[in-house]
Image: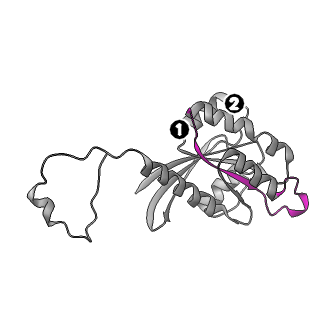
């Protein structure tokens, strides 16, 4: 089973806690937190995995804490509210801090939350998609309130994280002749590589 730590980043009030709660507990609450971790086991592409969500709500202004969460996270969800142009405009700052701390291109998804607030929309779906192309990441609109696409965000992120793991260089192949017991493996048996 693979384990992933996912940090949810974005401005205050965009629904970071609500996304974490909806994903892990399947409910919608406005319980403001300082920092909390939510955990969930789920199956992605017939493989069980364990996702720990680091919720950074309430601490957006503390850059040092944000850097700590970025260091701890393996994947990231960059969230804005579709009903707030200001939260959309501040995403670049969050992306820059991720790139600075991770020294390169972190695996993250762009999420436009509060898609249930159709009447209050300030950021179009097209703008979100365009920014995701610019950031070179996947984009999904969600509603933590109705649970629309919430699970999809996390399963997509797990897939992206797994791809990067499989790209890593494989260990060198041993040059010694195989031992006798190695010949007994049939095609159906799965082999486990411990790295």
Q: Where's residue 88, x and y in %?
A: 80, 45
Q: How many marks?
A: 2
Label 2, secondary structure: give it.
Answer: loop
| First of labels 1, 2 by sequence position | 2
Please check the rendered image and state whether residue 46 is part of the magenta-colored stretch, yes or no. no
Give percent across and percent down for residue 13: 78, 47
Q: Nearer the viewer, residue 125 or 27?
A: 125
Relative horizontal placement of residue 87, taking residue 35 as reference (left or right): right
Within-10-Å neighbours for mark 1: few <14, some 14–19, many 20+: some
Residue 134 or residue 27, whichever sits in front = 134
Residue designated by label 1: 72
Q: Residue at x 70, y 66 (%)?
A: 148
Residue 108 drawn in magenta: yes
- Camera-near label (1 vs 2) is 1
Toward the viewer: 189 or 167? 167
**Residue at image x 75%, y 41%?**
91
Q: Which residue is mark 2?
A: 62
Give the image location of residue 178, x and y in percent: 13, 54
Q: Seen from this angle, which residue lies furthest top?
A: 64
Q: Is residue 175 visible?
A: yes
The Cα atoms of the two marked residues, 1 and 2, are separated by: 16 Å
- The residue drawn where x is 29% and y is 49% is 194
| Horizontal relation, residue 17 to residue 85: left or right | left
Q: Which residues are magenta?
A: 103-124
Give the residue at the far left of this rendering.
180
**Horizontal side of residue 170 vs 32, given as left or right:** left
Along the line of sight, the residue nearer the viewer: 40 or 177: 177
Q: Which mark is residue 115?
A: none
Q: Residues within 10 Å of mark 2 (few under 14, many from 20)?
A: few
């Amino acid at each position: 089973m693979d384990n992933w730590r996912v940090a949810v980043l974005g401005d205050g009030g965009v629904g970071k806690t609500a996304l974490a709660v909806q994903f892990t507990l399947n409910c919608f609450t406005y319980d403001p937190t300082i920092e909390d971790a939510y955990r969930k086991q789920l199956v992605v592409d017939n493989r069980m995995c364990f996702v720990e969500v680091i919720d950074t709500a309430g601490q957006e202004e503390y850059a040092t804490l944000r850097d700590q969460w970025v260091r701890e996270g393996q994947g990231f969800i960059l969230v804005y509210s579709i009903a707030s142009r200001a939260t959309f405009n501040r995403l670049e700052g969050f992306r820059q801090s991720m790139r600075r701390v991770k020294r390169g291109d972190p695996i993250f998804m762009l999420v436009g939350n509060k898609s249930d607030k159709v009447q209050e929309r300030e950021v179009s779906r097209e703008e979100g998609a365009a920014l995701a192309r610019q950031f070179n990441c996947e984009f999904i609109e969600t509603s933590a309130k109705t649970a629309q696409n919430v699970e999809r965000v996390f399963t997509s992120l797990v897939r992206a994280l797994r791809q990067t793991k499989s790209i890593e260089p494989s260990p060198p192949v041993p040059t010694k002749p195989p031992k006798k017991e190695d010949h007994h493996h049939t095609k159906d048996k799965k082999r486990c590589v411990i790295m």
